[in-house]
Amino acid sequence: MTGKTTLRLAARVSEIQPSPTMAVMADAMRLKAEGVDVVDFSAGQPDFPTPQHIKDAGEKAIVDNFTRYTPNAGMPELRKAVTDRYREDYALDFEPSESIITSGGKHALLNLMLTLVDPGDEVVIPTPYWMTFAEQVRLAGGTPVLVPTEASTGFRMTADVIAPALTERTRILLLNFPANPTGAVIDGSEIRALGALVEDADAFFLWDDTYARLMFEPPPAEAFGEVQDRLDGRFVVAGTASKAYAMTGWRIGWALGPKPVIEACGALQSQMTSNASSISQKAALVALTSDQAPLAEMIAEYKWRAERLRAGLLEIPGLSCSMPGGGFYLFPDISHYLKAGETSTDLAAAMLKEARVAVVPGLAFGLDGHLRVSFACARDVIEEGLSRLVKFFAARAGS
Ligand SMILES: Cc1ncc(COP(=O)(O)O)c(C=O)c1O
C-alpha cells in the first residue's frame, strides 16, 4: 500500500461520524491496559456480570450444538418471550409476528430507520441525545430535527417543548427514555400528550426503551398501552437485552411494530446480517422468561449510586445536576469550570490526564458545558472518583 491514490468512498459514509462515546471508552481502556489507575465513569454498560443462569443458557446452547442459523427474524420462542414481556411490563400488545430479533438495540433502530425514513422525511429527536440517532437518520437519507430540552427542567421532553418541531414532513418522533445521557423519564400524562401530538402529525412514535427496565419509578403501564391503541400501528419500539440483563456483548435486541414494518425490517435484515447469534438468542430467552426479581435489586443499587454520586457532585461549588429517573448516567453542568475557549471535550481530556477520571464530554451528546458521568461502577469506585473530582475542580478554581 503506497497510500498515493485517493480512495473514493460512497457519499453515504463520508459524512458519518464514528461513535464519540466509544472513542472515550477506548482511551480509558488503553490507559487501564497500560496499568494506569483510571476511575472509569465513562462506561455505557453495567458493571454487573451477565447473571449466571443466563450464561449457563448460552453455554448449554453451544454444548447442544445450537450453533446453526435460526429463522432470520429470530427463534419463535424468543419473539414470543419478548412480546409477552412487553405485555406484562408496559401493557403493549404486539403479536410475536410483530417482533424481530436483531443483533443489539442499535441494529433494531437501524432496521426501523431504513424501513420508515425516506429522503426528505424528518425525525424529531429531543436533545441532549445519543448521537447514533442522528447518524442513523442521515444514513437512511432523512433529516434529524434536534429539539433542545432544558437543564432547568431536568431535560424534560414534554409535548409543549416538542410540538413546535413537528411539521408535515415529520415521519418519526423518537423518544429515548430514560434518556442517554440525561436519565430524563417521561411521566404517564406526558406520554399520552406526546401520543396525541404524534397522532395529529400522522407520524410514528418510536420508543427507544434501552434503559426502560432500569427506571426508578416507571410510569403506569397503561399509558403506553393507551398510546399504542390511539396510534393504531404507528407505535414502534427498539429494545435490547444489553443494559437490563447486563448482556452488552451478546448483541441481542428487538424491534416491535405493526406487521408490514416488521416484515420489511426482516427483508432488510435477511440481506444484511441474517439472524442474531443463535447462542445469544438462547441466553436472551432465559433472561426474558426467568424471574425478573434480580432486576429490582439492580435498580435499587443504581438508585443508591445515583443519589450518592449526585450528592457528592453537588458538594463541588458551581456544579448542578438533576436526579435521573433511571439508567446509570448523571449529566452535571460543569460550565462554571470552563476556561475561555474551552469545551467540555477539553475539560474531559484534562480530567483524564490530571485526575485519571474518565467521563464523556457533553458535546458527544450535542450539549456543551456538561459531562456524562456513569455510575455503572462499584460504590468504592464512586467514592474514589468523587474525591479525585473534588481535588480536580478545586485545583481548577484556584488556577
Ligand atoms: C439510547 C441507546 N439506545 C440504544 C443503544 C444500543 O444498545 P445495544 O446495541 O448494545 O443493544 C444504546 C447503547 O448505548 C443506547 O444508549
Image (cartoon, rainbow, N blue to C red):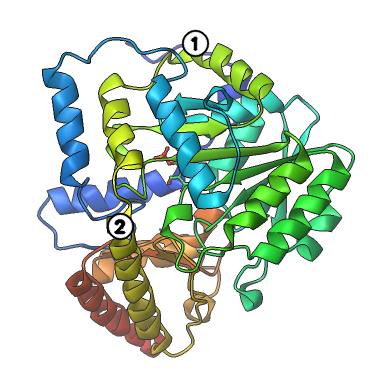
Is 201 displayed left or right of 283 in the figure? right
Question: What is the CA distance from the residue labelled 2 to the residue labelled 1?
Answer: 35 Å
Q: Observer-nearest residue: 265 or 146?
A: 265
The answer to whether one can see residue 392 in this image is yes
Q: Residue at x 55, y 22 (%)?
A: 97
Label 1 residue SS = helix
In primary-sequence order, the first of circles 2 and 1 is: 1
Name the image quarter holding the C terminus: bottom left
At label 2, the amino acid type is Ala
The residue beneath circle 1 is: 270
The residue beneath circle 2 is: 293
Q: Which of the 4 image quarters holds residue 126?
A: bottom right
Characterize the local packing of mark 1: few (<14), some (14-19) or many (20 or more) Cα atoms within 10 angstroms. Answer: some
Name the image quarter holding the N terminus: top left
Ligand 1 image-quadrant field: top left
- Which label number is shown at residue 53? none
Residue 233's place in the image compared with 187, above or below, is: above
Q: Position of residue 111 (x, y in %)?
A: 56, 25
